[in-house]
Amino acid sequence: MADEQLTLADIRAQRNALQGEEDAISFVRRLAQGRLDLVQDEQRRRASGAQQPVGSLTDRLADVFGQQHGGGSARPPRETNVPADHPLVLELDQLCEHYQFESMENIDDKSLDELAGALGMFEKSCSGQRHDLFEKIDALTAELVRRVREGGAGSIVKES
């Protein structure tokens, strides 16, 4: 429950800030999922004995993001603008550089498996962070609803 001394405007501002954090984490998580999909495609390609993939890594990443994965959040989407220097973006970029994501077709199977594992762990960490944020956002929303119900419709107008 939120601090009783906070105004409705304060609670809304906190909730909006947390939603912005969640948007950024969600975006980076989707990036990690797309890259993991590409690594898994490479693993399947190798297991089947198929030739080298056609198209650049960028083209293949665009194909992955163009596919529907289903599931997802029941929450309505919001416009997301995540800067390239966001800490999670930088962390994902460093992870990919360390495990040679951009040249995954040329690394050995063990290194490819390590890349897949690292991306999976990163995605799982982002999922955990999102879950924690959802709990905080939901608690703030519940507090807003409680206060509006107790204060009546007039409290919406006074503090909007």
Image (tube, rainbow, N blue to C red):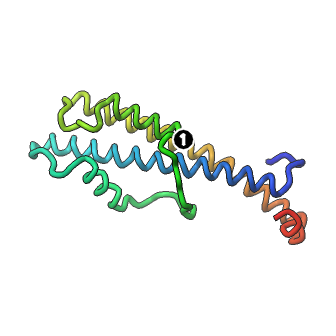
Residue at x 16%, y 45% (from the top left corner): 45
Residue at x 89%, y 63% (from the top left corner): 150
Mark 1 belongs to which amino acid?
Gly
Identify the element where label 1 is drawn: helix
Left or right of 158 on screen, residue 145: left
Left or right of 86 on screen, residue 102: left
Mark 1 is surrounded, within 10 Å at the Cα level, by few (under 14), some (14 to 19) or many (20 or more) other residues, namely few
Residue at numbered disc 1: 128
Q: Residue 49 in the image: state x and y as whole percent.
A: 9, 42
Q: Residue 111 in the image: state x and y as whole percent.
A: 25, 28
- Count of marks overlaid on the render: 1
Q: Residue furthest bottom?
A: 153
Name above or below for residue 126 compared with residue 114: below
Q: Nearer the viewer, residue 135 or 28?
A: 28
Name above or below for residue 74 compared with residue 26: below
Q: Residue 2 in the image: state x and y as whole percent.
A: 81, 48
Left or right of 87 on screen, residue 120: left
Residue at x 39%, y 47% (from the top left corner): 33
Q: Residue 52 in the image: state x and y as whole percent.
A: 12, 44
Q: Quadrant of the C terminus?
A: bottom right
Left or right of 13 on screen, residue 154: right
Q: Nearer the viewer, residue 15 or 144?
A: 15
Name above or below for residue 71 compared with residue 42: below
